[in-house]
Image (tube, coloured by chain):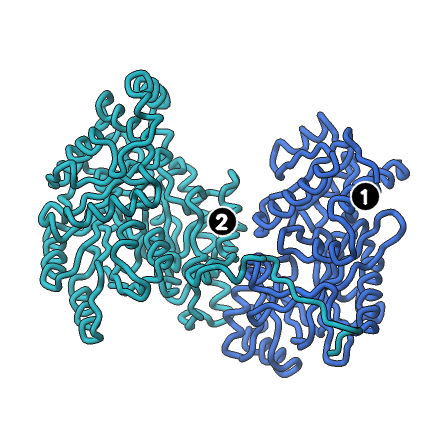
Amino acid sequence: MSTHSALRVVVLAGGLSHERDVSVRSGRRISEALRNRGVDVDERDMDIDLLPSLIADPPDCIFPMFHGAAGEDGAIRDVLDLLKLPYVGSNPEACRLTYDKPLAKTIVARTGIFTPEMVVLPHEAFRELGAGAVLDAVEKAFGFPLVIKPSKGGSALGVSIVHTAAELPTAMVSCFSYADCAVIERYIAGTEVAVSVIDLGDGPVALPAVEIVPDGEFYDYNARYTAGLTEFFAPARITDDVSQRVAEAALTVHTILGLTGFSRSDFIIDGEGVPQFIEANVAPGMTETSLLPQAIEAAGLDLSEVCLALVNDAIEAHSAQA
Amino acid sequence: MAPPSGESPLGNRLDPHLARYAKRTHGMTASEIRSLFAVASRPEVVSLAGGMPNIAALSMETVSSTVANMLATRGQVALQYGSGNGDQRLREQICEMVGLQGIAPHPDDVIVTVGSQMALDLITRIFCDPGDVIIAEAPSYVGALGVFRAYQVDVEHVAMDEHGLNPEALRETLKTLAAQGKTPKFVYTIPTFHNPAGLSQPQDRRMEILQICQSAGVLIIEDDPYGLLGFDGHIPQAIRSHDSDGVIYLGSFSKTFAAGIRVGWAVAPHGVREKLTLAAESAVLCPPAFSQLTISTYLDTQPWMDQIKIFREVYRERRDATLEALTQYMPEGTTWTHPTGGFYVWVTLPEGMDGTAMLPRAVTARVAYVPGTAFYINGDGRQSIRLSYSFPEPDRIREGVRRLGGVINEELKLMHTFGTLGAARPSVSSQGSTPGPDVV
């Protein structure tokens, strides 16, 4: 892979979402990776000066690493499309489908991939129908434990695992503090794995699954971003057969959601060895404790080379489109 | 589930030093709440979170000329190592300053430190072994709780009333501890313009607390960073002014000059000060001479009391804006303190509300505060939040409180829907509930 000393890339990180801190760290790591390959990198936040500077001095490519709303919901990429600027990663439509977790689960389920049963309920549904009655119905249908999560957003913010009816109201309030719509899922016990997919120009390839074993009950914010609180296995301790099934599932998710460049899909391998799709990410974390960099390393690849290849591929795809 | 073939891959916890960390680091984890404060530094957000002094009220020309003057006259000293207990001239000036609060120490009783935070650290270091007990108000200064936690000290909280630390509660706590065979190493208190509660102890309350501690043979750590910032110009007399042996007094230039200069001090009894000096030398060799001489020159050449009057007026204006806005925008059932100095208002939310759980909604609405849990060692304080009015402009404060009112109303609706008003909440660690010192 050649070194492009003249290549100029703007890495977008920060933003105003709840995941700003994680985004800044992801952006910094991507920037370092690209600089290691001689790329001229400018790190920019989402603010009033961003678009004028991109218009006045367009870079060769943009690497969006905003997490959360306006970063992963397709908005910033819509704007980049308006400006006809090349960027790494998925287009706005794919982002919109993926960022909406219940929508993504519905689309993925149609391909035959299993995903935990869910109901999707805005705050108004509880208010108008009565929270007690709705939660009773959920409890009867799914039983405990339940997973409560915001319909949008990442880093497990606002996510709870609920074991009793008494815990439900507090979990719902916590969830609705992050989003207006809640997903209530049947809890699936099993092995948690993340499968990253990268496409360096020759089609999407699934990287080795990374197994996640948090010290606590689930892979929450603390477990994600405190080195030491989670043990990772890359590749995951699953059979070759299961490994292949989950890799195929991740490739299917990547394709069916129209994702480009790179993505990460999260699964629970249930007791029968069946991958259950949880969610997909269009801008997966790139911090020191994140999963995609571990998968790249497990595949024997180099993060800098992968990032540079993603940039080059985005530039070529943009040129071809033009 | 069986591995595919051969040996299982080794797990990786992504930190090769994991087995080497001291036990006291075990609670040092990433925090969902702390991560939200990253957004608070953005200009779109009205941050009522960090207690940042309003440096805009300090003339940069004055600071610049002071530094130039200092370098011209004492530059060789300023750029060299200095004494472990601080510059002699500055210690004399500190004695003059604390005289305003009725304290009359000898300059040798003063130890200059890197902010009063360092003094607090040194005091805890020389007095407390892991498992020792200290007493602190409930709520208490989050930076102090961080120090106590780092030294693995058990903190016993004592309730406050509208006049600060409650003497009856203090007596009860001392009695309970005595029954358990425990003697607290000290009582940590902020008697004037308390952080976070915004309350001040009247003089008779101070005397009562002092007498209780004297009777019990317990040392008092009197933390007083805001003592000169009373809005009516009145300067309360320090507890230390009544007892030079049983009280260690902590002061700071962070609020009366500039926080970035990082100079504070302790006034301590002779035996304590010797140990503090030795502990300080092992920690930092000496406090920064450049900062000390800059302040010393400033105090010698500038009308520093006039500057303090300017600060008082800046903070009074912001306090007024905060209280007016709270009256206008807070829903029924919300109460708050009425500070007569300092930086903070302590807001108690309607019954059953949770300031920690509400923070994501507030950040979405572009307003930030510090949840009350940050100011308790044991996860209490969920129903309260701290608002700092020191930094934003009054109009921004009004807008921030308006947004906060909307957030509380939305949260109330949600809680009514789910019937969680008054519901018990699981306790959380207070460690992750506070922003870093640079978050505004």
Q: Quadrant of the C terminus of chain B?
A: top left
- Does residue B80 appear left or right of residue A157 in this picture? left
Say which element carries label 2. helix
Chain B colour? cyan
Say which element carries label 1. helix
Q: What percent of the width, then of the height, locates residue B235?
A: 16, 39
Protein chain holding label 1: A
Residue B334 in sight: no
Q: What percent of the width, then of the height, locates residue B188?
A: 24, 55
Protein chain holding label 2: B
- Does residue A309 appear left or right of residue B10 in this picture? right
Q: What percent of the width, then of the height, locates residue B412?
A: 46, 62
Image vertical order of residue A200 relative to residue A123, above or below: above
From the image, tell me which residue sits under label 1.
Answer: A309
Residue A283 in sight: yes
The residues tagged by marks 2 and 1 sit, at their Cα atoms, a distance apart of 34 Å
Amino acid beneath label 2: Phe
Name the foreground residue: A319 vs A302: A302
Name the foreground residue: B48 vs B259: B259
